[in-house]
Amino acid sequence: MALTEQRQLAFEFDASRRRTYADFVRQASRELVVYRHAIANFITTSLSARYRRSVLGFFWSLLNPLFTLAIMSVVFALLYKRDIRDFGLYLFSGLLPWNFINASIAMGADCIISAERYLKKMYVPRVAFPVVSLGIEFINLLFSLLSMFIVMLLIGARFRLTVLLLPAALLLLAAFLFGLILMVSAWTVFFRDLSHIIEIALRALFYVTPILYPLSLLDNAAISAVLKLNPFYYFITLSQELVYSGVLPAPDLWAVCLALSVLSLLVGTWVFHKLEMELIFRL
Amino acid sequence: MSATVELHAVSLRFRIYRNVSPSLKDTVVNLLTGKRELDQSSDFYALRDITLELKPGERVGLIGLNGAGKSTLLKTITGIYQPHEGRMMVRGKITPLMELGAGFDPEQSGRRNIFLNGALLGFSPAQMKAKVPGIVEFSELGEHLDLPVKYFSSGMHQRLAFSIASATDPDILLIDEVFAAGDGHFVEKSSRRIDEMVQRSTILILVSHDMQQIRRLSNRVIYLEQGRIAADGEPEAVITAYENRLRELNRAH
């Protein structure tokens, strides 16, 4: 089976020919280009709806994470007897990427199910919806980063030059998440309770990732070894080193993140390729 | 490139699951206890061995009882369902108009949905901007377009959907019962618009239970029964065959 030319102008389908993984990847990338306006529309509509619902509109998107972080900084700085400004920056550097991880997986898990309205009325490539979920949360992340930098300026925190590498780290994280979203978005169609399980798993992972507590709290080798089984640990550490510590992350750390992203993309696209055709019959 | 729709021996199976999406919890429990009832499913053919070829200028009326496969056939031609058997080839820009609210976001205004719907049909915001005045005028919805679509009546829904669909200048227009909710004025106006579109060698496939409408708009009628083509040809002959079948059924029950 193969799609020829632009999907919206012509297509061919032959049930006796099996679609290969390469066919799927080629078709999906082409369709994402053809449907770019629809993807952009879904993203902007969702973002503007989210911000319109609040009185202060767009500003809430900046203020909300700031207040949360301010409260947490005060609480944990007192708890650990650390300087609020210093600990606040540490929190920021781990919590913002974590919020991105959490929100995009939660949204991605439901994206095919909530797109039923469109998928059953007209042809829309299924792969567009994982992209939309990731896009929405990525833009949200950029907003919260913006507010983080504003706060850093206000409290006179030191800007580390390494922050310039943050975009590269976030793109790696986005690629890693895209693979995960592809997997969970297809699986939740088959097992509707999966999104609850994912939610609980993410909450547990949050506490085993050094975000709320400093790394130095863990001088137990056994515990650190267990923590390193968590793939998110590497991405969060990367961000913390770039934004907070100001040290150039070791090449090993970059390599682990890159390997995780590639692996996740490969598995994610493969799972989606296997299940995609069946999705419409399960909605 | 002229529009064509070709289907060769196309069959589509629906699998009826006891439980379409069992929970992971139930599945695990069943695996452990050895119960398999959740997996139970039975297949039925929604389309069976459909072969047809449509050429530019053909306006096909699709008739048949509920569950005969009319909507499924439209959705297969649109690409929503992939057939399990057979081959198909579709050339031309397709605009589907399925039931109510073809791909609308109910929370968004009518105006925003024009852009969303257009984007789903492959148009950029700039291209849609040029089409908006025409869509607004044809739909006669005026200031209602600023309301979220969820407050639209089904007639208003249909006005908007048809206005967008016809403004996108499709090569292949698929219509599924959308005129059911329309008032006489709009149905008349839409029929004239369809006539114009067919003049420009558009292929039209119309699903309807209103035989008057089928007579008025089609130059070929296909009668589906249990997923198979029972008759295909001259509108009057096929409609008569269908109506005879209806009479038979009415006598039997």
Image (cartoon, coloured by chain):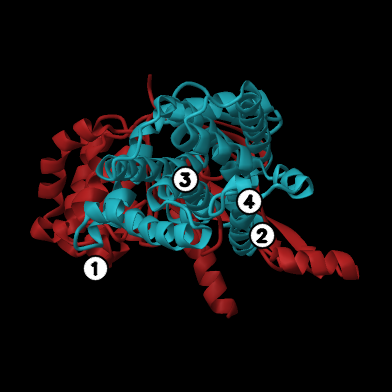
Q: Are marks 1 and 2 on the same chain?
A: no
Q: What is the C-alpha distance between the residues marked 4 and 1?
A: 56 Å
Q: Colour of chain A?
A: cyan
Residue at 75% from the left image edge and 69% from the top image edge: B26
Q: Secondary structure at mark 4?
A: helix
Q: Chain of mark 1?
A: B
Q: Secondary structure at mark 3?
A: helix
**Pointer 3 residue:** A90
Q: Nearer the viewer, residue A272 or A209?
A: A209
Q: Amino acid at mark 3?
A: Tyr
**Pointer 1 residue:** B151
Q: Chain of mark 2?
A: A
**Pointer 4 residue:** A217
Image location (x, y in percent) of residue A164: 40, 25
Residue at 29% from the left image edge and 33% from the top image edge: B123
Labels 4 & 1 near each other (Cβ < 8 A): no
Of marks 4 and 2, the one in the foreground? 4
Residue B27 sits in which quadrant?
Answer: bottom right
Image location (x, y in percent) of residue B190: 21, 50
